Amino acid sequence: MAEEHLETLTYRFSEKIVNAEPLNCDRAVINAKYALIDYLSAAFMGAGEDSVDKLLSLIEDEGGSEDVPVIGRKTEASMLQSALVNGYSGHILDFDDVHSDVRGHPSTVIFPTLISLAANYDVSGKRFIAAYIVGLEVMCRLGRAVGKSHYLKGWHNTSTLGTIAAAAAGGYLLKFSVGEMEKVIGFAATQSFGLRIQFGTETKPLHAGLAAQAAVRAVKFVQCGISGTSSVLDGKIGFFSVYGEGCDYAKNILTENWNRSWEIVEPGLWFKKYPCCSASHHAIDAALELFNKYRISTEDIEEVKIIFPPDGDSALIYSKPENCREGMFSAEYVVALALSGQPLSRDKFKSSNIPEDIRKLMAKTRRYHDSSIDIAKDSVPYGRFTIVQLTTEDKRIYEARVDCPRGAPGNGLSLDELKNKLRNSPVSKSAADKIIEVILKLDTGEDLNRLLKLF
Amino acid sequence: MAEEHLETLTYRFSEKIVNAEPLNCDRAVINAKYALIDYLSAAFMGAGEDSVDKLLSLIEDEGGSEDVPVIGRKTEASMLQSALVNGYSGHILDFDDVHSDVRGHPSTVIFPTLISLAANYDVSGKRFIAAYIVGLEVMCRLGRAVGKSHYLKGWHNTSTLGTIAAAAAGGYLLKFSVGEMEKVIGFAATQSFGLRIQFGTETKPLHAGLAAQAAVRAVKFVQCGISGTSSVLDGKIGFFSVYGEGCDYAKNILTENWNRSWEIVEPGLWFKKYPCCSASHHAIDAALELFNKYRISTEDIEEVKIIFPPDGDSALIYSKPENCREGMFSAEYVVALALSGQPLSRDKFKSSNIPEDIRKLMAKTRRYHDSSIDIAKDSVPYGRFTIVQLTTEDKRIYEARVDCPRGAPGNGLSLDELKNKLRNSPVSKSAADKIIEVILKLDTGEDLNRLLKLF
């Protein structure tokens, strides 16, 4: 019986998680700190949105303890409540990180869970960093192990996989045994939820918050001793059979090469430089390159071509956005902003009218799709590129091509750029600097509670 | 666009739900009252279990408002918290109702949701009864519409479908518009969760509580104005595509014959007469028939045969239970109790040792499977029967056969039997009588709040 148990995938995966030692990898630690700065930038900015007030009104009705900070709101709530809001705020603007193996947003689920737990248990900054790296590792491996059909079928990976990853991160933070790790994965996997049909509504970021909340709940169920399965991932009615391609497909992906390479390093996270759809970032960088090189007056521009591979712009659903908010998903809008030398800042994507000068430039802009153009081997995501081509009134042509935009793995943001991302959020510049200072020393004895007080 | 919207399945289903008028059907109303008595019997009995203390300890840590009764615990908690515990208590002993179209337990999800809402909003007893009937209707239709593959794949229908049904019941209770009903179904369906691999652990009843809680949350998301999809059931990545056989399979099942027949009447609910696995109830009734008719002393019994159709006893996994708790899933144990004239009461299924006299009789008992025996057309579930055959020391043979056990549709419990089920729970007899008195008058102006105060 004991030997049989050793054979379960849930056991072997749990054993790898519990014994993970990510702090041995310096690059993983640095990237985790960057991820925390980036998540907080997104969450502080998101916390200013009106819809966060709606969640806070629900929490006020519920009452509850006040021991976990609600980021950017100068208030506190219970572990479950704060996990909900902090996950929501981190994702409401879609300004948070993505990972290609997750096919979704990892940090806005994992960090809120860890923050709720860290505020209630005595854990070190070092352990917090390690738990995040482990949670991300779990989520990326689940993403690969569940197979491509999972997302295509209609699941929202951010929540379906995030619940399990964040629960595992929480278990690691609190130094769960292998048996407890099996259980917490069980409680999380059986709560796994979230449909992509909610995309385009506030329920998409809500999924992130609910996933973080479900992960906290999973940790608490282990702690209070509720009984649950130790082998949720296994067998014909286990997680991978119900949500994926079965266990055989998953098993090696979950268990091989632990402590040798880390998903946070290779391929790594994509931190967004601009608060709009990531599919438009290639075009923005190409347009910025033209602007910075040639400073062509928009009045001298006769025509703008934006050239994609076939379907390369399918997420950019607005060719003629009706307002700046729709501009988040418009290649024409963001290219016009960049060519006009205007900053791609959050205020450019609120529900206001599109200014006349931008509309004029958009009217001269057309999209093209060209399947004959070679793919760059370092393109991110693989196969994607965007070319921006200007023709001036005097018939000169200027062109720039981007295969891997700023922020994507291979073209990562510098620490200064990340610092600016946080400084440009509603948090004060001095608070941003303090937060960054503490985060950068988190693994060397800096007090985690000091950090939480800055939220 | 408006016309396109009218065509969605989510719209048409929501429209049927909002316009449901179940109070026109007297039998539906009576059965709903019986269902409430039955649910409370299970919940009061379940509330005495140690594991309920675990959930209450979590709630104590969380804090929160105290406005909804926690059944059988003389305490109150928030809407979300009470929904969790009341759903858990109702299902922990598996003593709550089942419905064949649900393939799961409806009342232990729907009632806790309605109780949480009723304690916080001004609703009539009449509306409460109607909302329950509507919620059950929704759950049964979802159960048929999602197809048999849903359960077989590994989903736990009680929670996957219960979340949606309870949210729809809650929306009906609060007189949601069609648009709000679409939304609440959306918030619920995107939270749908629960794996059967958790069966046999406390996480099974936990699913019921978490589903009730998710349903309350769905109602609150509508109320606070979070945006969400209006067509969660539709299309290639909608609920029925992800969890079932697609929309085409589901559409007529969800929308036809509303206000003409009700699932609570035909086929109706199964109220359990004995606090043990429903697959053993045929055997119990057959053994009781023999005991009541012949009063044969157990010492005179030479042999007991229990005869099932092939696989008719697959849920009865203990042929040789090690203790009385395992006896919940043992045909041999329950038949021995019945033949000995002992009551099949809750205390007979706790974790104590099996008494010597019962063990002796179990040792003379064997199971048989006979595929040659004709199936009765009123068998419940269809195709099931159990024959108990005694041979005495003096070689006489006595036999009884049951196709539809007491409590099942077609052989329902009388009001007196249901009253006794509640009276035999830990609630005092006088409190039980008061509860029953209020419930029986709930649709004729009796105060719902008076009922809640008796929990």
Image (cartoon, coloured by chain):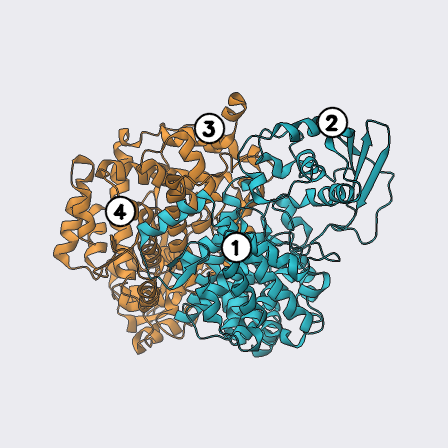
Chain colours: A orange, B cyan
B299 or A420: nearer the eye?
Answer: B299
Judge the density around disc 4: few (<14), some (14-19), many (≥20) Cα neighbours within 10 Å.
Answer: many
User: Element under label 4?
Assistant: helix
Number of the front mark, 2 or 3: 2
Tell me the CA gap for discs 2 and 4. Answer: 67 Å
Residues at discs 2 and 4 both on one chain: no
| Amino acid bearing label 2 | Lys
Do the residues at pointers 3 and 1 share their chain?
Answer: no
Residue B189 makes an appearance in the image: no
* Residue furthest left in the image: A430
**What is the number of the mark on residue A397?**
none
Query: Front-most of B20 and A392?
Result: B20
**Could you say which quadrant of the image residue B129 lies in?**
bottom right
Foreground label between 1 and 2: 2
Q: Are marks 2 and 4 in contact (CB under 8 Å)?
A: no
Q: Chain of mark 4?
A: A
The quadrant in which residue B349 appears is: top right
Between the C-alphas of marks 4 and 3, the distance is 29 Å
Residue found at x 14% / y 51%: A433
- Location of mark 3 (residue): A12
Real-space Cα separation, disc 1 to disc 2, in angstroms: 46 Å
Q: Quadrant of the N terminus of chain B?
A: bottom right
The residue that mark 1 highlights is B192
**Residue type indicated by callout 3:** Arg
Residue with the mark numbered 4: A36
